[in-house]
Image (tube, grey):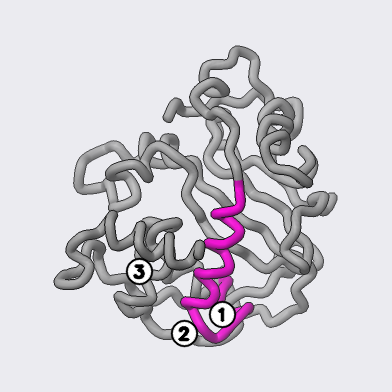
Amino acid sequence: MIRSFLTALALLATPTLASAQAWQRPHAELPSAEQPVRNVPTTGYTLALIWMPEHCRARRGGASELGLECRGRAAHRFTLHGLWPDGTGPNRWPQYCKPVGILTDRQIAAGIAATPSAQLLQHEWAKHGSCMTGDPVRYFAEEDRLFADLRFPHMAALSRRRGLTVADFQRAFAAVNPGMKPDMMRLNLNKRGWLEEVWLCLGRNRRPRMCPANAGGARPGARLRIQEP
């Protein structure tokens, strides 16, 4: 049901899909000296979410810099960055586990509703999905399922709240998601303290768990600013 809904949403959001690409064709995402192949055991997962109002504000230097993700409703909400397998510590997570090809238009359509960027889909599939399955559509379906199950706090109200801290946001996010606690997420802020991403810690069963001690993220007492949706 969720998969068919997301696919339908993608088709509605990109009406030219059947006849012409509504996105630029992605290029290959390959391992490098800085980002090498790592076939190591998976100990859990991270579900990473992008707060699009800040993402798009940072890219607003010119219309040519704004991609599909910064047009329409996607620019005013959370979108899915990806589902990442975790490992035993810093620089010990699985990545680029096997070579993959360029995604086809139909494979992109399977993930574009939740992650409205063909290049990001290619990156996530190559770096993370290749360590989980041999089928990109199956990978997109699993991360989309987890994303579709989430509920979000009132972001407009939080953006106007004075003295907001990371801990305040964590409590608000956990409160609307049964079974989640504030210590089951990390926040990624830019240097000026604006919210960029929320990273949810999941166990091997892909259910929320307390984030590992070495997971990083902003300090709970840090002041937090949120770009208004």
First-in-chain label (1 vs 3): 3
Image coordinates of residue 156 in percent, x first then y, are: 49, 24
First-in-chain label (2 vs 1): 2
Q: Is residue 87 left or right of residue 46?
A: right
Q: Is residue 35 left or right of residue 20?
A: right
Residue occupied by mark 1? 130
The type of residue carrying mark 2 is Val
| Magenta-colored span | 128-150
Image quadrant where residue 63 sits: top left
Q: Is residue 8 left or right of residue 152?
A: left
Q: Which mark is residue 109?
A: 3
Q: Tell me the element at label 2.
A: loop
The type of residue carrying mark 1 is Ser
Do the residues bearing badges 2 and 1 touch, measured as CB atoms within 8 Å?
yes
First-in-chain label (2 vs 3): 2
Residue occupied by mark 2? 100
Q: Residue at x 18, y 64 (%)?
A: 16
Main SS type for the magenta part?
helix
Measured in 3D between alpha carbons, the distance from the residue under mark 1 to the one under mark 3, in whole angstroms, is 18 Å
Q: Tell me the element at label 1.
A: helix
Image coordinates of residue 178 in percent, x first then y, are: 74, 43
- Residue 133 sits inside the magenta stretch: yes
Q: Does residue 164 appear anywhere in the picture? A: yes
Image coordinates of residue 214 in percent, x first then y, are: 80, 52
The type of residue carrying mark 3 is Ala
